[in-house]
Image (cartoon, rainbow, N blue to C red):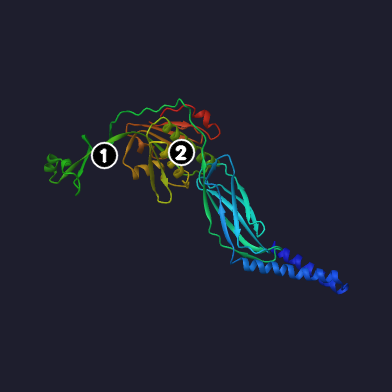
Amino acid sequence: MMRKRRFAYGAWLLFAILLYFFENNTGTRTILAASVFLPAASILCAVRSVRRVTVHLSAPDCCKQEDAAECSVRAEGLLPGAVLTAVLRGRSRLTGEETAVKLSASRFAPDAAGTLRTAHCGTVMLSLSDAAVQDWFGLYRCALTVQSTRLVGGKVQISLAENETVTADSERWSSNHPGHDPSETFGFRTYVPGDPIRQIHWKLSQKTDSLMVRELGLPVEEEVLLLLDTSTTGKEDAADALDAAMTALLSLSRSLTEQGITHSVGWKNRELEELSLCTVRDQQDCTAVREQILTAAATPDTESICDCFRKWSGDVYAHTVVCAPSLPRGLSLLQAGNRVTVLLSDGGAQSCGGVMVVPFSRKNMAQELEYLEI
């Protein structure tokens, strides 16, 4: 593009020179002088503006999923003959969806606004790329390195039915996972320094001629556990399925909070490569967890949320709900005589031994999840 403009300017300048030689008068001299000095002055302003300009990116902290994010860029320090051009890009951390809009600012119009739309919930990372300062005529261009990034979250406005009920069973003990119930023995193992002395099995230690300790039963929490699986799939509608899974989890968490039911929400933190697990007791906790989980990123992963949970947490919950875009591996790791439900957002009806699978789609979520018993 710049080569074409320079070629066009060269042709115009040649025309002005020829016009001056063939018809030397005030008008031709004015045209020739303007053809030389105006571009030269604009280029000089652009060169000097490169070291003076500062760029500020502003965007709303959050917006509704169906609305567009109104973003703006403000350029300060531009001289009158210089123009700032840039591309405002948005990328969803959850689905990888990308959008872009071109912006332009000058000394006389320092604020440039752009509208970005995203079809899915989650956090959108905003950044400026291809930023450059150029003259009015497009003959000179100097690239800028702009380090300005913003995160824009999305609010989900989908709720479950009011008659949704969740009833937690009384506390019981797992026969599949070790814990600290003194009345239930899960198994035996060799003593390790630091083990409680009261857990030593003296008769068995005498027979084996080595210290053996009891592994006690693990208590089942009287809480509901909500897990989000952000592992991506190769399906065409993977982004819609991920969006629906997160929307379902946030809606369920809000509904439980409104009913006064304490619950926990867990997902895999891709940056730390560990489990993030938060307890939600009131509306303040619910809002805090929503803001955190909206920053979750989705990537291909061989470790499912079930594997991640068992790796980083030893608890067993009376009621576990997994919101996933596809049936996750390792669901048996969450089972210990408790109730496990999978909200499957790709709409495919699948069965899994001992696990209740509730298929739904992003389009018909409100109808398909109108009543949910977990």
Which residue is labeled 1 in the image? Answer: 178
| Residue type pointed to by label 2 | Ala
Residue depicted at 36% across the width and 37% down the height? 334
Residue 189 at what x, y percent from top left? 21, 43
| Residue type pointed to by label 1 | Pro
Q: Is residue 207 above or below residue 112?
A: above
Residue 286 at what x, y percent from top left? 43, 38
Residue 191 at what x, y percent from top left? 18, 46
Q: Residues within 10 Å of mark 1 (few under 14, many from 20)?
A: many
Q: Quadrant of the N terminus?
A: bottom right
- Which labelled disc corresponds to residue 324? 2
Asked whether 150 or 1 is in front, the reply is 150
Residue depicted at 39% across the width and 45% down the height? 276
What residue occupies the far top of the structure in this picture? Answer: 163
Please identify the quarter of the rendering in which residue 328 is found. Answer: top left
Q: Is residue 284 above or below residue 82?
A: above
Visible residue check, residue 45:
yes
Element at label 1: strand
Residue depicted at 75% across the width and 70% down the height? 36
Kindly report the distance in space between the C-alpha atoms of the residues bearing marks 1 and 2. Answer: 28 Å
Visible residue check, residue 307:
no
Residue 268 at what x, y percent from top left? 41, 45
